[in-house]
Amino acid sequence: MKHTDVIQIMKDESLLGQKLTVCGWVRTARDSKNVAFLALNDGTTLNHLQIVIDKTSDVVLPEEAAKLGAAIKVVGTAVKNERNDTTEINAEEITVLGVCPPDYPLQKKFQKLETLREIPHIRVRTNTFNAVFRVRSVMAAAIHRFFQDRGFVYVNTPLITASDCEGAGEMFKVTTIGYSDKYKSAEEYYADDFFGKKAGLSVSGQLEGEGAAMAMGKIYTFGPSFRAEKSNTLRHVAEFWHVEPEIAFCELPDLIELAEEMIKYIIKEYMDRCPEELKFFEERFEKGLTEKLLNVVNNEFAIVDYTDAIKILEEAKVEFEYPVYWGCDLQSEHERYITEQVYNKPVFLINYPKDIKSFYMKQNPDGKTVAATDLLVPGVGEIIGGSEREADYDKLVAAMQAKGMTMDDYGDYLDLRKYGSVPHSGFGLGFERIIMYCTGMSNIRDVIFYPRTVGNIR
Ligand code: 4AD
């Protein structure tokens, strides 16, 4: 269907005076004695195009075209509205493409985000979700551009995996066998299953990504990861999009440099390419958002040792719900205090106790900590988790044994330490978490098209 996008009509003055075809959905309809107006949105911009119908002429406005949500096609001339300096269309012919009955769920102008979560297929038609998903698209492209421009190879790691516990979280099972009491043991059950062994949805592409980095030097993955923890929080979903670079010949300080550069790059791209959406989020969801993001782009992030963070928390004049001591896993209240109250900017926390981190992290010479880092940001908390990897075969095996892991499942992974092992590092960025930070949306369920959480799927 040949037609012109609303965004183009609004931007391109050379279209003034031309006869155009526009298509879209009706957002509002106003009627007076001699003239009627329709506000048309085609999804290409948050702004609506005004369609003007001269009722004294022989232009017909079909009754069904003046209904909220109706899909229409309009042929008319682009003219300048001198009062507000925007382009509008003087309609000559209006066709209804799809009627929209009064039970259309978006009748009210403002609806609670909570209510909209019940209708993911319809909420995407609101300005809020149009803006969120455009920002997601622009930032996804920026992530690819960042890595591609720096020579990283985009690798697609498997979503179905047999490696049981990467250490990152609970896995969803993948099976083709339904409920059955036919089997006497788990072994018998798995042997009869599709893959002949236990399989699950991957919590991270890292382990395979490391293999690719040992061949191509610099790689990244960008795809879904799955976590079956029943953590019903504002920052967790069971299916999230995960960006995971893995770099050979890279130590922790190099990794931190790369992560900071990437975050600044993608935020800057967002600010440059989505001014309309940024303004919308600033007005509706987070006052001061633009200034916050400018500060991120223009200032150094803080780097704080875990041990120093513990001292800061112990000395804080705040009653934390969870106790603070060296060796504790930091809770969201602790992370937020550090990044919001103390630094008020993104903070790389480094050198965590080895007992609370994954087996693959590079062991520091102190014997107590690992060369890990989490990037914490005000408002959202952890958006990145990463580390230098343990490259020494014996040390890795010892760490795995200490964590009670079965070596048999990790033969491939251990091979990487056997054949030409090198210092290497990587991190995982939660895509939804950075979108939350950049839009001011406070619930992760509102930055992903179809959120999957405990007890909730549709
Ligand atoms: O810290 P995580 O668990 O690290 C890993 O999975 C490593 N294998 C990454 C690596 O080094 N390649 O997860 C990384 C990030 C977190 O910082 C968070 O932003 C996001 O993934 N994340 C989630 N986002 C939404 N919902 C969840 N349930 C998430 N779990 C982790």
Image: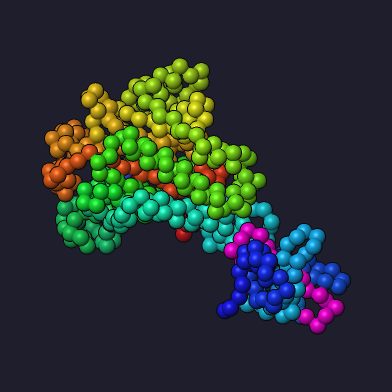
Residues drawn in magenta: 40-59
Taking 104 as reference, is 356 above or below it?
above
Of residue 342 and residue 67, the one placed in the foreground of this image is 342
Q: Is residue 264 visible?
A: yes
Residue 21: image location, x then y, percent: 65, 76
Which residue appears at 72% of the width and 65% of the height? 87
Which residue appears at 25% of the width and 44% of the height? 248
Q: Is residue 452 visible?
A: no
Residue 351: image location, x then y, percent: 32, 28
User: Residue pushed farthest bottom?
Assistant: 58
Taking 159 as reference, is 166 above or below it?
above
In the rendered image, which quarter contains the N terminus?
Answer: bottom right
Specify whether residue 94 is painted magenta. Answer: no
Residue 18: image location, x then y, percent: 70, 75
User: Residue pushed farthest right?
Assistant: 33
Determine whether, in the image, residue 113 is placed left or right of residue 343. right
Determine whether, in the image, residue 275 is placed left or right of residue 398. right
Q: Which quadrant does ligand 1 occupy?
A: top left
Residue 389: image location, x then y, percent: 25, 38
Which residue appears at 45% of the width and 53% of the height? 142
Determine whether, in the image, residue 270 is placed left or right of residue 62. left
Image quadrant in which you'd find residue 262: top left
Image quadrant in which you'd find residue 166: top left
Of residue 409 and residue 220, the one placed in the foreground of this image is 220
User: Residue pushed farthest front?
Assistant: 14
Of residue 27 and residue 374, the one placed in the foreground of this image is 374
Q: Main secondary structure of the magenta part?
A: loop
